[in-house]
Image (spheres, rainbow, N blue to C red):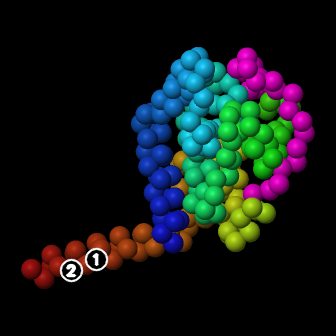
Amino acid sequence: TLRTSCILRSASALHRVHMHMHMHMRHRASDNTARARGTPLIGSTLRYRAPECLLTDGFYNYKMDMWGVGCVMFEVLSLYPLFPGTNELDQINKIHNVIGTPPPDTLAKLKKHSNSHIDFNFPHKEGSSLAKLIPHISADCVELITKLLAYDPDDRISARQAVKHPYFHELREAEKRAAAEKAASAGGAGAGG
C-alpha cells in the first residue's frame, strides 16, 4: 500500500543518514535550551521523543530516530498519536501505559545518565499492548512497531534492520520486479534502435 511504501522509504532514508553518521541531535539541544529557559516543550514533537531523550542528559544515539519512526508509523496506520503527552513526565506515563514500565535494569542504565528533574520511582505498569490499539494491522506490522518502540535503545532495531523486516517483504519484491521490468524494457529498446 501507499502507507507501507512511505514508511519503508522513510526507514530507508534514515538508514542512509545513519550510515553516514549525520545524526539529528538538534531537537535535543533545543529541548535543553528550552528547559534551561523554563520554556515548555512543543507538544507535537514531544509525542515522538524516545525515553532516553526524556529521561537522560545526552545518553542517546541514532536509535532515538527509530523510536520516532515507530511513533509516526503507528500514527499513520491508526490516524491518532500513540503518546500524546503534555510534558516530559506525562509523556513517560503515556509510554508506560502502552508498553509497560521497563525492567529495573533498563531504568538503572538510564538513571546513571538522568536529568535531575525526573524521579525514577515509576509505578509498575503492564501496558495495554500495541496489538490491542491497532487490531486491524497485520502481526508483522505490530511486531515491527514493537521493535521500533523498544524502551531500551540497545534493544531497539536499527534502520537497516527495519527495512529488512518481513513487514516490507512484499513491497521489496514488487520493487525488484519493477526494476527488472524497467531494465528489460530499457535493454530491449536499446537493442532495437
> Looking at the picture, how far across and down is residue 162, in whole percent?
58, 53
Identify whether 41 is placed above or below 37. below
Residue 112, picture quadrant = top right
Dot 2 alpha-carbon crowd within 10 angstroms: few under 14, some 14 to 19, many 20 or more:
few
Instruction: Tell me which segment is drawn in magenta.
Output: 108-130
Residue 139, picture quadrant = bottom right
Identify whether 153 is placed above or below 59. below
> Looking at the picture, how far across and down is residue 149, in whole percent?
68, 47
- Report the front residue among 88 and 40: 40
Q: In which quadrant of the rendered image does the C terminus lie?
A: bottom left
Q: As drawn, is 12 to the left or to the right of 62?
A: left
Q: As drawn, is 22 to the left or to the right of 107?
A: left
> Looking at the picture, how far across and down is residue 122, in whole percent?
86, 32
Question: Which element type, helix, strand or loop, lies under badge 2?
Answer: helix
Q: What amino acid is found at the position of numbered circle 2 in the picture?
A: Gly
Which mark, by number, is residue 136? Answer: none
Identify whether 7 is placed above or below 178. above
Residue placed at 48% from the left, 39% from the top? Answer: 18
Q: What amino acid is found at the position of numbered circle 1 in the picture?
A: Ala
Which mark, by number, is residue 188? Answer: 2
Identify whether 18 is placed above or below 164. above
Type of secondary structure dominating the magenta stretch:
loop
